[in-house]
Image (tube, coloured by chain):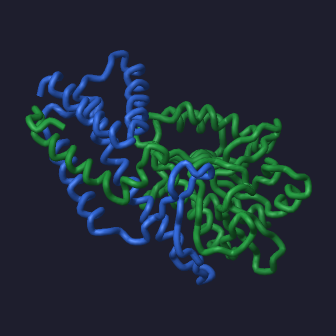
């Protein structure tokens, strides 16, 4: 810090920044989290609210399948049945259909390679099959829908993530091409152009954070996905 | 403000970001600047780089504050359709490999955090009004 800065407001800004980094927000903006952990939690919460909008019942469960009231989410990807983490179970009132919502788990793509899904809605019956077959990851065919989340701060980045997304979408969706979306806080306009050219609506959401129309649109899209799946 | 002064100010800001574990934020800004300069066929000036960094830092804090509050609101709100409430008592973030201590998401904002955010907003506003700090064209 320079007390004799040629920019009069800079020392005050640096001091304010330093103070803010010592608060609860500083604990989220860490070198390992990059803000991504809380962003995934936010998107997870959007999925749960969309499920409730559809009349589904939502309960939280830990990895062992026991009910919990602590939402414990991963800060790095891991296999779905490892560690003590929380997922949500979405059920119809008559119990005829159940889905699970997870964050930061690996899913096996159509090629057999594993991929991280930031937020994923899975068919719950894959759980029994997975355990019977001693598989560590759900198969892509069990994916109802998945979100790739990116906490971007500048408004001119993201093209590399867009390129990666198309590979992930192919791996998780196969020929259907309908099971994933890229959701970002901010990104460059070139990212939007790529999606507009190569995908129908519903695969790319930019500007998703509280108070933004894009967040409402995403929630509406998740409702559609769930309603279509349950129909 | 001359470009040398902006250069020094930028170095100060980058030093703070690195020392507080925010090098990732710097990298995102640099990636964006690099893409923009490729489109404009000239590298960004020091004052543009500085303005971009300041905006990114301020936005990151606003974003996290909004997302934390938004997450809590979504998790604790009652469903308009079924009147159902989610039974969530705490939100935790944990590393599957145990490399860091689990963190908890605060359910309510705290006075210290609120006043730090207010001070940062005010300082950002003042700084963005300084002559010589200019937005990317």
Residue B33: x and y in percent read: 37, 28
Task: State the image quarter where residue A101 is shown.
Answer: bottom right
- Up the image or down, B13 lies above or below B4; here it is below
Q: For this rendering, which residue is in front, B90 or A174?
A: B90
Residue A197: x and y in percent read: 61, 34
Q: Residue furthest top?
A: B41
Residue A64: x and y in percent read: 74, 66
- Up the image or down, B88 lies above or below A207; here it is below
- Up the image or down, A6 lies above or below A208; here it is above
Quadrant that contains the N terminus of chain B: top left
For the point 44% across and 57% down, the residue is A212
Q: For this rendering, which residue is in front, B121 or A55?
A: B121
Q: Say whether residue A155 is left or right of residue A222.
A: left
**Does residue A217 appear in this view?**
no
**Does residue B71 appear in this view?**
yes
Task: State the image quarter where residue A66 is shown.
Answer: bottom right
Which chain is tinted green? A
Quadrant that contains the C terminus of chain B: top left
Q: For this rendering, which residue is in front, A122 or A221?
A: A122
Q: Residue furthest bottom?
A: B83
- Up the image or down, B128 lies above or below B120; here it is above
Q: Say whether residue A117 is left or right of residue B134.
A: right
For the point 17% across and 43% down, the residue is B127
Q: Chain B is shown in which shade?
A: blue
For the point 13% across and 24% down, the residue is B2
Residue A198: x and y in percent read: 65, 35
For the point 66% across and 44% down, the residue is A200
Q: Say whether residue A97 is left or right of residue B83.
A: right
């Amino acid at each position: 810090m320079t007390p004799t800065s040629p920019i009069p407001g800079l020392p005050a800004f640096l001091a304010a920044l330093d103070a803010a980094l010592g608060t609860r927000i500083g604990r989220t903006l860490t070198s390992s989290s990059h803000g991504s952990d809380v962003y995934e939690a936010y998107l997870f919460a959007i999925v749960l609210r969309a499920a409730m909008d559809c009349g589904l019942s939502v309960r939280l469960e830990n990895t062992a399948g026991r009910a919990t009231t602590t939402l414990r989410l991963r800060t790095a990807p891991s296999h779905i049945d490892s560690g003590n983490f929380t997922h949500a179970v979405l059920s119809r009132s008559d119990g005829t259909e159940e889905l699970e919502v997870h964050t930061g788990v690996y899913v096996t793509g159509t090629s057999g390679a594993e991929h991280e899904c930031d937020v994923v809605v899975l068919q719950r019956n894959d759980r029994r099959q997975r355990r019977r077959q001693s598989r560590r990851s759900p198969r892509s065919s069990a994916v109802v829908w998945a979100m790739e989340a990116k906490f971007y701060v500048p408004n001119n980045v993201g093209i590399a993530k867009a390129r990666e997304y198309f590979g992930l979408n192919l791996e998780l969706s196969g020929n259907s091409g309908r099971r994933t979306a890229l959701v970002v806080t901010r990104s460059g306009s070139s990212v939007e152009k790529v999606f507009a050219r190569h995908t129908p609506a519903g695969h790319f959401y930019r500007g998703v954070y509280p108070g933004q129309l894009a967040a409402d649109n995403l929630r509406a899209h998740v409702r559609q996905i769930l309603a279509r799946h349950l129909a | 403000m001359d470009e040398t002064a902006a250069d020094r100010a930028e170095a100060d800001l980058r030093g703070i970001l690195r020392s507080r574990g925010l090098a990732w934020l710097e990298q995102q800004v640099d990636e964006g600047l690099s893409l923009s300069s490729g489109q404009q066929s000239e590298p960004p000036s020091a004052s543009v780089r500085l303005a971009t960094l300041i905006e990114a830092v301020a936005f990151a804090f606003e974003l996290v504050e909004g997302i934390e509050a938004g997450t809590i609101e979504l998790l604790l709100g009652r469903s308009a359709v079924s009147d159902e409430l989610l039974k969530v008592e705490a939100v935790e973030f944990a590393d599957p490999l145990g490399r860091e201590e689990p963190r908890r998401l605060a359910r309510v904002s705290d006075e210290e955090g609120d006043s730090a955010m207010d001070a940062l907003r005010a300082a950002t506003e003042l700084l963005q009004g300084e002559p010589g700090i200019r937005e990317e064209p």
